[in-house]
Each structure stands twice: as structure tokens, then as C-alpha cells.
Amino acid sequence: MTQHNQNKKIVTTEQLQWLKRESNLWQEQGLVSNEAKNSILDLYRSQEDGDERRSALSNILLVSLGALLIGGGIILLLAHNWENFGKGLRTFLSFLPLVLAQALCWYGVQYQPQSRPLRESGAVLLFFAVAASIALISQTYHIYGDLERFLVVWLLLTLPIVYLMRSATTLMLISAIILWLCCLEREPYWLLYIALAPYLYKLHRQNSRLLLHWSLWIGLIGLTISVVYGSSYYASPLDHWGIYIALALGCAFYALGYWWFGFDNTKFWTNAPTSLGILIIGLISLMFTWYGRTLPSDLWQVESPMTLNEYAILTIFTVSIVFTALFITRNWKVLSVSNWVALSSFAFVLLGITGFFIHQNQNVFVIASNLYILTGSVLLMFQGINRNRLLLLNGGLIWFSLLVLFRFFDSDIPFVYKGVIFIVIGSAFIATNIWFKKKQHVKGSQS
């Protein structure tokens, strides 16, 4: 996909709009099919497309920030004189931000449905107005409760805002609340991410790529942290399983991205599941290389009772293993070397949960993980050079460099030697990228 985008012809916005109108006429006259029309349009891209997307994103972020500042300022002004107000006035002021925010949302949906900044600002104001109203009414009428109950009520009341206002900012805030709940209590609140799935599917069907990519990154990162933290929460019986659960999720995300977006989508940002999956795989594999890493004497020993959270995490763990195994068996003929480098980490999950590394000498585990990263990073560097992909080349370099640094931190090498090694690795990065750019330039001039 990256090479395909580079081969697209750049035209002006007016030329691209003219081509779209003409191609629609060709389709109506039966000269071309819908697939042929889309193939023709896919050969061109507007020079202003990237600038417009970046401008729209920055506009949304700035408007959302402005809405947050306005709402915070109003709350501070009210809080300054709150004790001087009567109960009736307090009740009125408690609902006033909620009413005003709803009015702004109604105006945006009714009269300015195409104005994304208006939708985002109204949705953010309504999101925090709900929390302010709950807190103020509780304080006024002495309705006491704990933080967990407040967050759950806030979440359930604001969840419809995501669908009614199509607000990406609100989706990120709701994802943050779910993550907060998961880190607060040992309960399977991460299952609430399922409520966001229809919104992601809707973005996919509407071809809203910018919002889809943002939403996927936020949702998947929150889900990963919630599940891994839930398996390691205090005296959870899955405490020793956390690292294998994280690796299984990474492999499943990696496979999910290619299953959803196809093998041609190799861009880091636009394929959130695969990109996040490779980051998880790289991080966990580096954790495996730590000397002195303790393994439980019996991985299957349960020291505390299982709760709904543990059963839910085991379910998603099992689903991740089955999905990854099915993906490998169905696509093994089309998997590239870089795909095999990532998916071969799945073997550590299978060996880990079967207790292979427990009954073997710990050195076997450490040697296997070091050899995996060493071999995988070298293969990625060669693949990056052969396939003319700088991202793969740098990925292999970073992975290999981190392995070297980890080994130095484990040893008693003097700081002077460590400093020299850092300089050598940094110089290798710079020299490799300069060489690669020159190679691309020479290849482009020859073609």
C-alpha cells in the first residue's frame, strides 16, 4: 500500500473533482463498472488531501480543548460562590450546564450537521456537564457514593453521545473512563469496550478513515492495558499468566489487522491492530530476555478464588490463541518473512502455558528468546533492504539495538564502554538511513 500511494499521480482538487463527476457519468452510461470507476479514481490523489486532514484534526483538537477550558472556567466561577447560594439556586445551576450543552448539541445536529468542530465541542461540553451535574446534585442533597459508582453512572449516561454526536473526542474520554475503572477495581469493566464496537463498524462502513484510526488506537490500547492489568491485579490467580496473555493479545492484534485491512496495508498509523500488535510482541519478547526472570513453580496453581474478571480474561485469552492459530493455518502460504518473524512469537505463548519453560533450565528460556530477537531483527533488516521499506529496516535496527542495550544493562560493563556502544549504535542508525535514502534516490533516478 505504501508503494501504491507513492505511485499515485498528484492532481489539484479541481481536477480530481472533475474526474469524479466524469466517472459518475461514465458509470451511468454503462461505459465503466463501479469497480473500474473506483480503480481509475484510486490512481489519483489530491495534493491538498493530506493538508486538509491534518487541518481538520488540529481543528477538532483545538476546539475540544477550548470547550474544556470554557467548561472548567464556568465550574470554577460557580465553585467560588457556591456556599452563598440557596438549595433551589444550587439545583438550578447544577442542571444549567447540562441544559446548555444539550442545546448546543441539538443546534449542531439540527442546523449544522456537517460542522465537525461544533459537534465535537458540544459533545465534550455535554460529557463534562453530565459529570458536573451528578457531582453538584449529590453534594447539594447529600447523596453519598464511592468513586466507582460515580464513574459507572457517568459512563453509562455519556455513552450515547458517541453515537448521537459522532464524536471521536468523547470516544477517547469514555475509553479513558473504562481504563480508569479497570485500574480501580478488579472487575471486568473492560468488557464495556464492546459497546464501542458498533461505532467502529459504522466508521468503517462510512469510510471515515481518520476517526477510525484514532478510535482503533485508543480502544485497542485501553483494552490491552485493562486486560493485562486485570490479570495482574493484586492477588489475581492469573498473576503469572499476565505476560503470556499480553503476548497472545499482541499476536491476535497483529493477525486481526491483516485480516481486516488486508496484507497490502503496511502503513504504521492506518493499520492500528497490526502496528500495536508488533509493538506488544517486540516489548514482551524483550522482557523474556531478562536474566533472573522468575517463573512460578506451577503455572496452573490457583492461590485465590477465580472471579468473573478472571473467567472473562481467560475467555479472551483463549479466543486470541484460537484466532491466531486459524489465521496462521489459513494464510501460511501468503505470509512474508516479516509476518513469520512476528507470528513466530506465538510459539512462546504455547510453550509458556504448557509449562515447557518451567520444567526446563531457565537458561533455555533466556537463550531461546535472545536467539528469537537476534534472528528476527536481522531478517527484518534484510527484508527492509530487499523490499525497499525504511520502516522495516529501522524496526529491525531498533529491535536489535534494544536487545544489545538490555544485555549491557544486565552485565557489569563499565559506563565508558556502554557510552561508546551507544555512540556506535546511534551512528549505525544515521549511516543506515542515509545509505538507504541514497539507494532510493539512485533507484528513482534510474527508473
Image (cartoon, rainbow, N blue to C red):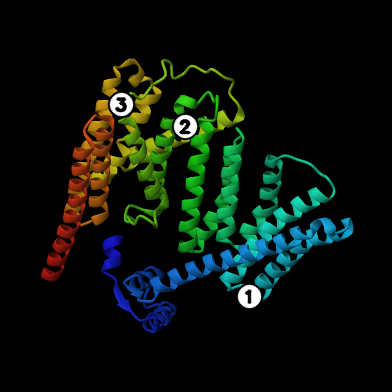
Whichever of callouts 1 and 3 sits on the residue coming sooner in the sequence is 1
Residue 409 percent across, percent down from the top left: 28, 34
Of circles 1 and 3, which is in front? 3
Name the residue tied to disc 1. 112
Q: Amino acid at mark 2?
A: Thr
Of circles 2 and 3, which is in front? 3
In the picture, residue 431 is in which quadrant? bottom left
Q: CA distance from mark 1 to mark 2?
A: 46 Å
Please name the residue shown 60% across and 32% down the image.
Answer: 186
Q: CA distance from mark 1 to mark 3?
A: 60 Å
- Crowding around mark 2 (Cα neighbors within 10 Å: few <14, some 14 to 19, many 20+) is some
Please say if the residues under marks 1 and 3 sit with CB atoms less than 8 Å apart.
Answer: no
Tell me if 435 is positioned left or right of 142 in this view. left
- Crowding around mark 3 (Cα neighbors within 10 Å: few <14, some 14 to 19, many 20+) is some
Q: Amino acid at mark 3?
A: Tyr
Please name the residue shown 34% across and 57% down the image.
Answer: 267
Name the residue tied to disc 2. 318
Tell me if 25 is positioned left or right of 226 in this view. left
Please name the residue shown 36% across and 53% down the image.
Answer: 262
Name the residue tied to disc 3. 291
Please say if the residues under marks 1 and 2 sit with CB atoms less than 8 Å apart.
Answer: no
Please name the residue shown 48% across and 57% down the image.
Answer: 214
Whichever of callouts 2 and 3 sits on the residue coming sooner in the sequence is 3
- Quadrant location, the N terminus: bottom left
Please say if the residues under marks 2 and 3 sit with CB atoms less than 8 Å apart.
Answer: no
Residue 307 badge: none
In this rendering, the answer to whether 265 lies above or below 256 is below
